[in-house]
Image (cartoon, grey):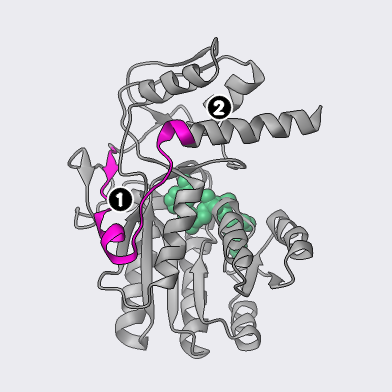
């Protein structure tokens, strides 16, 4: 698994390790350390500190470890990160992915589950969309994710790889590493801080709870015959941000959490593409994916975890 020390990768690795799978967890930087900590609990985890931009290092891992399937989570993640350094984004997301595809093709590893994103669609043309919606990414991040999807198709056609793309929405839950709704609302509420989101009250976004995303990805791993190469793994619903803030205030009575009308701006500057719900029928039909956490349940679980963290710190 690439990016195995990250938010999604770490949760996914834990799920696979807990059921007895052998996981080769590849990551670089501080998140590789998180994997080393995890390996003390799970002897079935092999930690590899490597950068996917280093083609030789990537191929050496495949030559030595001989994985059956790759779950590709490593990436520079999010629209804001893509704006901060588009060159680094394309280097890691596209060139790094090519290194992984090349190593797979040369070392006879035939399957990849690539964690893609709803950002491949750009502006949604309807309030609820399926995987046949036209792809017109707006930001460099979505363009890089779509490029990896197309490269996977190319490696499928030319080198026989099976590359399955899991297009997920805004995944949230305990340990979320970025400053983004709804987790920033939960953290502010739990800490007694006011949070006024400067825009987006009527924007509708699909938020996927971490455990649901993990369950969907595991479902895609376990399914060997895929009639499609792209699936939505999301919540299949899209509350407005005003509704999200309302749920946070219900969970933490007295919390001072509000969202202003107008567009939602990434980093206060860049307008978010129009979003909506991701229809998950395909993933349900093919590998039985059914999200278990509605937003209230997911936010309550995130709140509980954050309160436990605060109690540990005090
Ligand atoms: N979290 C979301 O809301 C969301 C939504 C849609 C898609 N995704 C996709 O899911 C995947 C995981 O996202 P996440 O939220 O866990 O992000 P994350 O930033 O927590 O995890 C990404 C991991 O990749 C690692 N990484 C980055 N560059 C690397 C490199 N050059 N070599 C090796 N490892 C490298 C990072 O160290 C990190 O551990 C990404 O591909 C992302 O695009 C995430």
Q: Residue furthest right?
A: 314
Picture quarter with ligand 1: bottom right
First along the sequence among labels 1 and 2: 1
Closest to the observer, 18 or 4: 18
The residue depicted at 38 percent of the width and 82 percent of the height is 161
- Report the residue that reaches farthest toward the top: 254
Instruction: Give the vertical position of 221 relative to 74 (above or below).
Output: below
Within the image, what quadrant is residue 223 found in? bottom left
Q: In the structure shown, which secondary structural element does the residue marked by tag 1 occupy?
A: loop
Say which element carries label 2. Answer: helix
What's the mark number on residue 137? 1
Residue 100 image point, x, y percent? 51, 75
The answer to whether 30 is drawn above or below residue 297 in the figure is below
- How many neighbours does mark 2 have within 10 angstroms: few (below 14), some (14-19), or many (20 or more)? many
The residue located at (52%, 45%) in the rendering is 81
Q: CA distance from mark 1 to mark 2?
A: 29 Å
Q: Is mark 2 within 8 Å of ligand 1?
A: no
User: Which portion, as a residue range, is magenta?
Assistant: 275-297
Disc 2 marks which residue?
A: 186
The x, y position of residue 65, in whole percent, is: 64, 84
């Amino acid at each position: 698994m690439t990016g195995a020390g990250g938010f999604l990768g770490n949760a996914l690795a834990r799920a696979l390790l807990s059921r007895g799978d052998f996981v080769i967890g590849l990551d670089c930087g501080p998140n590789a350390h998180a994997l080393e900590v995890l390996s003390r609990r799970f002897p079935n985890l092999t930690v590899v500190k490597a950068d996917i931009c280093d083609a030789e290092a990537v191929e050496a891992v495949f030559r030595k470890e001989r994985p059956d399937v790759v779950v590709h989570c490593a990436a520079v993640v999010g629209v804001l990160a893509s704006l901060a350094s588009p060159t680094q984004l394309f280097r890691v997301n596209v060139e790094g992915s090519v290194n992984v595809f090349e190593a797979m093709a040369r070392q006879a590893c035939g399957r990849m589950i690539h964690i893609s994103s709803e950002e491949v669609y750009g502006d949604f043309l309807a309030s609820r969309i399926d995987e046949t919606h036209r792809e017109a990414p707006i930001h460099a991040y979505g363009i890089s994710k779509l490029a990896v999807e197309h490269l996977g198709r190319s490696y499928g056609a030319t080198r026989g790889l099976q590359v399955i793309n899991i297009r997920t929405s805004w995944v949230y839950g305990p340990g979320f590493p970025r400053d983004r709704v709804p987790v920033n609302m939960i953290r502010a509420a739990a800490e007694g801080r006011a949070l006024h989101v400067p825009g987006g009250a009527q924007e509708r976004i699909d938020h996927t709870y971490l455990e649901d995303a993990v369950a969907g990805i595991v479902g895609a791993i376990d399914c060997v015959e895929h009639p499609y190469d792209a699936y939505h793994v999301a919540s299949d619903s899209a509350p407005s941000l005003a509704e999200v803030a309302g749920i946070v205030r219900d969970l933490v009575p007295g919390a001072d959490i509000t969202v202003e009308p107008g567009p939602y701006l990434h980093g206060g500057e860049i307008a978010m593409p129009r979003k909506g719900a991701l229809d998950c029928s395909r993933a349900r039909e093919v590998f039985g994916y059914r999200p278990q956490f509605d937003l209230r349940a997911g936010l309550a679980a995130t709140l509980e975890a954050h309160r436990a963290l605060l109690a540990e710190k005090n």
